[in-house]
Image (tube, rainbow, N blue to C red):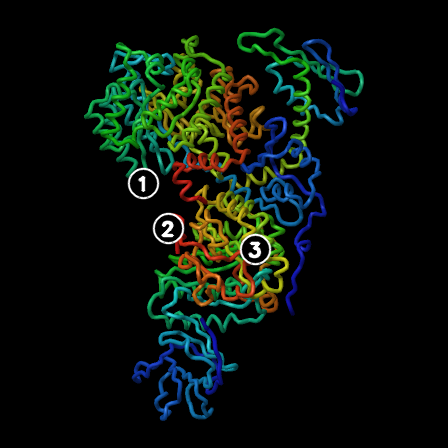
Amino acid sequence: MPRIFHPLEAYSNSAAEYRLLPFRFLRLDNEAELLVNEVGEFVVSPKGTAQALVRKQLIPGSDTYLTLRAKQFITDDSSSPLLDLLATKYRTKHSFIEGFTKLHIFVVTLRCDHSCHYCQVSRQTMDKNTYDMGLDTAEKSVEMMMKSPAQHLTLELQGGEPLLAFDVIRHIVPLAKRRATGLGKALDIVVTTNLANATDDMLYYLRDENIKVSTSLDGPAFIHNANRPRPGNNSYELTIQNIERARKILGVGKVAALMTTTQLSLQHPIEIIDEYVRRGFHSIFLRPISPYGFAVKTKKKTGYQIDDFLKFYRTGLAHIIRINQDGYNLAEVYAKIVLTKIMTPYGTGFVDLQSPAGAGINVLVYNYDGDVYATDEARMLAEMGDQTFRLGNVNTHSHKDIFTGEPFLSLVSASCNQSLSGCSDCAFQLFCGSDPVFNHATQGDMVGHRPPSDFCRRHMQVMKHLFGMISERDPELMRIFFAWIRNSSLREICEGAPS
Amino acid sequence: MRLATAGSPCSFSRPVVGRVSRIPLPAEGRTDRILLREDIPQDVEDLRGYRGFLTLARMHPNFSLIPTISSIREIDHLRTGDIVAMEPRNGFIRTLYRPDSHHNVIFATERCNSNCLMCSQPPQDRDDAAALTQRNLELINLIDTPPSRLVITGGEPTLLGERLFTIIAALRDRFPETYVHMLTNGRTFAWPAFAEGLAELKHPNLMLGIPLYSDDSTIHDYVVQAKDAFDQTMIGFHQLARRGMRVEIRVVLHAVTIPRLPQLAEYIYRNLTFAEHVALMGLENIGYAPRNMNKLWIDPHDYQDQLESAVEILSTRGMNVSIYNHQLCVLRKSLWKFARKSISDWKNIYIDECEQCGVREHCGGFFKWATKLHSQHIHPLAPVLDQETSPRA
Amino acid sequence: MSSVDDSFGCEIDSEFSATIRLDPRIYSKEAILKACYWSSNIAYIHIPEAPDERLVVRIELKQKVPSLENPKALTIGEFVPEFCNSLLDFELRRQVEAETASIRQLILAKAFSESGVLEDEPVGTVVDPVEEGAPGSLVQIIKADLNN
């Protein structure tokens, strides 16, 4: 029988009304709307699209119709809705859950020689025995860490100032490595330190054990010193010297810097960013200060409105983009995280912006005294007398006790923004996260009330800003964004793209 | 490059597959060889032991006792070492394999369950599965030096069912290091048992090239002329990827696929992120294409915007992209780095305008049937000095 | 501000307050409550009992004088249109939810189930005319149950 050719219409069946697939939307501004479906596919459309879509007023065969069908916002009788494809994409977006707790923070000591205004750690300068992690506690904490089913673990050594308890570090590192190898797990180690006490021997040790360093650089001298007072007022000079020393011994790629924003910082985004460029760093994380620890007590010096932070962020981001356009590779880490969630099929492992919240599920904190907390912030709350998020203690609780105990279970029940008031309808839901600890600390309740929430306002405004930039469809800007997402440089992206 | 010829068959009733030899061989070396001579030997004993005999000359039908084809039209293209199939009924001599070519193909079947508007190998609804599989297994046995790559194509190879697995298993066992590239519409793999059957073979070096023509199911189904093809192919991709099978996506560029090409690029990135490679291919004016040309033709010069946009989307997101079958003079210079010299040697030509071109050696040229239809904008280019813009082979 | 259709009526009562009357056949209580939720930071909202069929929403802005934190306060004339947009949006969302809740459950169930367990059968047919006439190993294979 001879084969014949059929026209396009033979393969289409939009006669019957189309059906909706799950999606959320919001107004970006007066002209544009954002529609996001259950797996993160999105369209930026003219105002009124969501309404037309819901009221079944889309014109079959129009570009908008075809695009919304291809992106799985609607389905009709021309083809099956490919729900299994949606399920696969959903799994991909949420694969950060796999393996359970991957980041394990060890507070090896509370002792510290700095007096930073915003410090979320209550500082203890003296008693080594009381405020260092005991070796027995350290061992039990390592055991607890190894109970995690994750194939790839990250061990973060913190404090106070962890290098002040170097002997504890020297005990933990080989033990953790041995146990990880025995279980076939990969292990990354990082130490967050101000480097003020880093001897050459310590740096050689870090190099030999392949431990990365994360240190603090708040900006040029006048900001850094004001933020981080020290006898002699030379915190900045010391920090720069020590960064160079650490780079020489460990390698430039092994030393990262984080800044903390204070009210002073907010006035000077350009100077701070320029300092990072001057020091040869290729990433900077523009983040607000958490409302915990000493920050609450010294609120006058560090308190500020989220709107001021947003202004700081927008100015800073614009400056960073210009720097990239001029040929210097500098990624803004918060934008990179959010852009990864928006522009790729994947989620991220960033524990502070996930749903379910990273607390406990993706990160666990082991305090010097063996107490186990859901996040670092949870530990700071405990320092101030609030034990709500203390999950247990390595000396008295098993892994199972921790994760089936009341504190963890009540935390988890408020962890999914899919079911939180305000979040459940939000178009940014998949790109955002939830933070029950933050809600509890700022509003007195884990679920939280969205309209006054600084967490909500900050993320929502930045995401609106980023979507505004994405919808401009500027190819060079998109290349910069993908350079950040892919941990590459604009130059490399351009080499692999049409040019 | 000629791959088939014909003559007068005699003394055999079943197809014969063997290796051509233009030089006479000692008795022990003749078992799987087909002797090729311009003339006929004086002594018929000179033919004893060969698998077959091919000659230009006219021959009396009773002369040869072994499978023979005489009065062959052309034999210049046949070299010693080539593997050919002799057909008893029509005297066809098909070249199945050439050791010195990089473009050897295992032709699985003429059957297909799609009917693409631009199909370069239009399907025949004839059950050739058993005969061709037998021929292909013999072919695989006769190849002595492992080729660097082999293509399995058709028609639609998966219609062979179990027989396809037999062929791939034979390739796995004989030539584990040979890169096997199978061209398939991927639809059958929507059934998990079929994907599982292929995965179980554990071929160490297998890549499936699967076409996808639109992000829109209706347009894709229309191009391939099969209802539900898009859904099946998409699910097929996922059943394969889930089992660790390697896949490549192929897109033929023509008037139906070009308008939504950038959207397809975005769709591929979001839904088929695991694809190792995306090939954007120029149209071949052969097979069904000529009769559907009014629906298909768009001058490549006129779709550079969509092409560049699609390549931009895929490459900035880290996916591997190549452009096949495009001449450098119609391809935007920014896209040269993605152009490959992709046309198989046996169908590759250049035209008059190419005589004076300074980048001819970098350019893939045309299909031999492009003399009838090609871009209006072919023109010679000045030699390119900048190494970075030179396309890769 | 006046409405263009009967489902909606608005009176500005004072510099800081307004009353909106809504047709409950068009605006569900759920949509109204959600719109109120998002305004609770800047307005007090009352929904008193109404004598007629309309739902009444009384709005009173919280901030009446400029403050250091918020020098430029929202006026009632700016607030009401925003609130109305919000009402409409939440009503649309309710409709989406109603139409897609069960499909969403299904997608999540598939996402969290083991590979292959909740998967749909492939649609359509994959046989060519030859296979159709004489089914061979192709059909045998694709019909095989993987879980046997």
Question: To which residue does mark 3 refer?
Answer: B299
Around disc 1, counting alpha carbons within 10 Å, would you say few (fewer than 14), some (14 to 19), or many (20 or more)?
few
Nearer-the-camera pick, A335 or A17: A335
B356 vs B99: above or below: above
Q: Amino acid at mark 2?
A: Leu
The secondary structure type at the circle numbered 3 is loop
First in sequence, mark 2 or 3: give its number.
3
Q: Are marks 1 and 2 on the same chain?
A: no
Nearer-the-camera pick, B14 or B217: B217
Around disc 3, counting alpha carbons within 10 Å, would you say few (fewer than 14), some (14 to 19), or many (20 or more)?
some
B130 vs B214: above or below: below
Nearer-the-camera pick, A220 or A334: A220
**Residue C88 percent coordinates (x, y):** 68, 26
Question: Which of the chains bears the disc numbered 2?
Answer: B
Q: Give the residue displayed 53% in from the left and 71% down from the top.
A: B128
Tag 2–tag 3 contact (CB < 8 Å): no
Q: Rounded to the nearest whole Å, what is the CA distance between mark 1 and mark 2?
A: 52 Å
A212 vs A293: above or below: below
Question: To which residue does mark 2 refer?
Answer: B385
As drawn, the label of residue A446 is none
Tag 3–tag 1 contact (CB < 8 Å): no
Question: To which residue does mark 1 refer?
Answer: A184
